[in-house]
Amino acid sequence: MTRSTMLALLLLAAAPLSQAQSPALPDAGASDAQKLGWMQGFPPAADKTVRFDNGSFYSFPRLRWSFNHYREIVPTKTVSRGDGKVQAFASAPRDLDGVQFTTMDGRAMNFAEALQNTYADGVVVLHRGRIVYEKYFSEGRAERPHLAMSVTKSFVGTLAATLAVQGKLDPAAPITQYIPELKDSAYGDATVRQLMDMTVGVQYSENYADPKAEVFDYARAGGMLPAAPTYAGPRSFYDFLVTLKKEGEHGQAFAYKTANAEVLAWVVKRASGKSLADLMSEQIWSKLGVEQDAYFQIDRIGSESGGGGLNTTLRDLARFGEMMRNDGRANGQQVIPAAVVQDIRKGGDPAHFAKAGMSTLAGFSYRNMWWVSGNAHGMFMARGIHGQTIYIDPKAEVVIVRYASHPIAGNAANDPVTLPAFAAVANSLMK
């Protein structure tokens, strides 16, 4: 696969919002992976095959298949659920399809239409811990893990904050206290707290329209995208992170950069002496009563992607969200310290966040790798590109989790529908 081909695939995935509303992109029904026949047959036809090595796994509409089948195309590491009993959800079905709202750009829409508009692969809505709504589309299935993308970061941030409360990690410490290998990098004079809140000044761009953006180097190094046969760059997350240079000052502004999450994952591993998968199993996953193991995508030397490699089922993701809504309690026990959730809900500095210029997230802040709304309901979120979401509304006692395969990577493409849709559902359930 040539560099130009790979860039073309990524540019398609990160196309501007105007293209999302263009007939050039098939809608959710027309891009349904089942209808299009991806990977059906033994073997599938050549024009219906989804592969990692040629980049087709990340081209639309094939990604509507691959996001639901990630373990089949990349190496992974298991997050064990342990041997505990599954904590089944109570069910109290509600017909939420007709819940009405107005999008940020003034369109009248209902919840069922919103799910199609955002290319949902599945959604689960909890109210007071009961499943009130659950639907799957395309290749989404209740029993099938889906790529969580940057929702992964919120798990890593939660683990870091938990280790801090346990006295195993000092957020005020320099990053180099845990990773001396980063002393000559952008992280050489930054603190763990600045890392947790994404206020590190580092030269790293996630602009997919720029072929020189560091995101391409990151993805190739971590094995998240195929590399050309002539590729001679870093071949692990660790090897890539030590190359990053400082840009600007630390602690002055929020800047969303996946490299920060990978460094935090490295810090968490060093502070705990455990792999990310084992630590997550020990601290969270084995305590929730989940139905299935989760798994991480790994690089060439077996290191988990803390920036976007987690895969879970939706119900299990909902269990995690419900635990966060309940101040860290789930399955009859305190899974993570209540102080961790309280610190996240408190939020970060809105003035720092505002400097990022994210127009769909006015008033938000960022804390411990969670997105905090600051609104009257105290809503906070975990978010991943292409539409992955944990939406927690403490006042409404609602948790909404959605996995999706939106053709456009950036959530600015679906936020104008998603955020008012979820708020409308939460408000309807309060009545």
Image: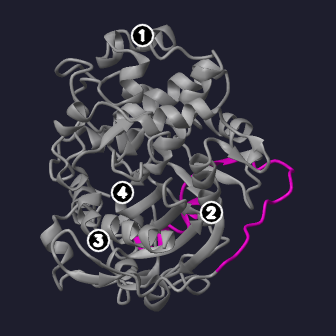
Gap in angstroms between the C-alphas marked 4 and 2: 27 Å
Amino acid type assigned to the residue bearing label 3 in the image: Val
Can you identify the residue that label 1 sits on? 174
Can you identify the residue that label 4 sits on? 385
Assign a secondary structure to mark 4. helix
Residue 313 image point, x, y percent: 62, 63
Residue 403 image point, x, y percent: 48, 66
Can you identify the residue that label 2 sits on? 128
Assign a secondary structure to mark 3. helix
Q: Earlier in the sequence, mark 1 or mark 3?
A: 1
- Graded by Cα atoms within 10 Å as few (under 14), some (14 to 19) or many (20 or more), the crowding at tag 2 reads some
Closest to the camera, between mark 4 and mark 2, is 2
Q: Earlier in the sequence, mark 3 or mark 4?
A: 4
Residue segment shown in magenta = 63-92
- Graded by Cα atoms within 10 Å as few (under 14), some (14 to 19) or many (20 or more), the crowding at tag 3 reads many
Amino acid type assigned to the residue bearing label 1 in the image: Pro
Q: Nearer the viewer, residue 159 or 90?
A: 90
Gap in angstroms between the C-alphas marked 2 and 1: 40 Å
- Farthest residue in the front direction? 431
Q: Earlier in the sequence, mark 4 or mark 2?
A: 2
Q: Is residue 91 magenta?
A: yes
Q: Earlier in the sequence, mark 4 or mark 1?
A: 1
Query: Do labels 4 and 1 touch, CB within 8 Å?
Result: no
Can you identify the residue that label 3 sits on? 417
Amino acid type assigned to the residue bearing label 2 in the image: Arg
Image: 97 above or below 234: below
